[in-house]
Image: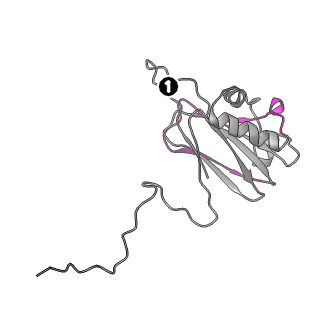
Amino acid sequence: MQLLVPISSAPAASRIKRPGERSLPPGVERYRVSGGGSIVAAVGAGDAVTLTDVEGGQVCEIAFCDSKGNFDMAALGTRADSQGEGLKTMLSGDGESAHRTQAALRRRGINLSKAETLHLFGEESRPGTSAEFLVARDGIIVVAAPGKPMSPENQNTATDIELR
């Protein structure tokens, strides 16, 4: 005689695809700017942009460009304090992030030699430190988390910036 094992008709259990990532409310997007990397994101008038120094101690540069390729930090309600030195240095590299950002800027006809950026955070910033900007008009933002190759003696690794 053969024993029959009942087959369950219950659906298979769901699995967590991205453990640790919280779900976001409707209309909120989240991007990770890898340490030593950069990202280009479209923004619209009325958007609120929040940048967070996830682990602390990371420099961040942000730039706004309008649809004509002009840099103008006034669209974020602030003033530029640099010419994007960290961003330019990163984009001269050979990494995937650099190539992706270069291509996005080229597609939009943006000349990086005219870059105006704002420095945020830095060596003294604490984990979770954030800055928020209200976007006045449509355009793109370029966010960079510049960093030098890590020195084992200094433990100066570049860490992530979160963009919402």
Residue 135, percent across and down?
75, 53
Q: Is 62 located above or below residue 16 in the figure?
A: above
Disc 1 packing (10 Å; few <14; some 14–19; many ≥20): some
Q: Which residue carries the number 1 mark?
A: 156
Q: Secondary structure at mark 1?
A: loop
* The residue stretch that appears in magenta: 110-135
Q: How is the image coloured?
A: one colour
Quadrant containing the N terminus is: bottom left
Q: Is 47 located above or below residue 96 in the figure?
A: below
Residue 83, percent across and down?
77, 29
- Amino acid type of disc 1? Asn
The one of 18 and 113 positioned closer to us in this rendering: 18
Q: Residue furthest front?
A: 1
* Residue 162 appears in the picture as rendered: yes
At a point 54% along the width and 29% down the height, the residue shown is 123
The one of 84 and 101 positioned closer to us in this rendering: 101
Q: Residue furthest top?
A: 153
Residue 20, percent across and down?
43, 54
Say whether residue 111 is magenta.
yes
Residue 149, percent across and down?
54, 23
Query: Residue 11: which quarter of the image?
Result: bottom left
**In the visual, does 56 lie left or right of 143?**
left
* Residue 120 appears in the picture as rendered: no
At a point 73% along the width and 30% down the height, the residue shown is 84
Q: Is 151 located above or below residue 90 in the figure?
A: above
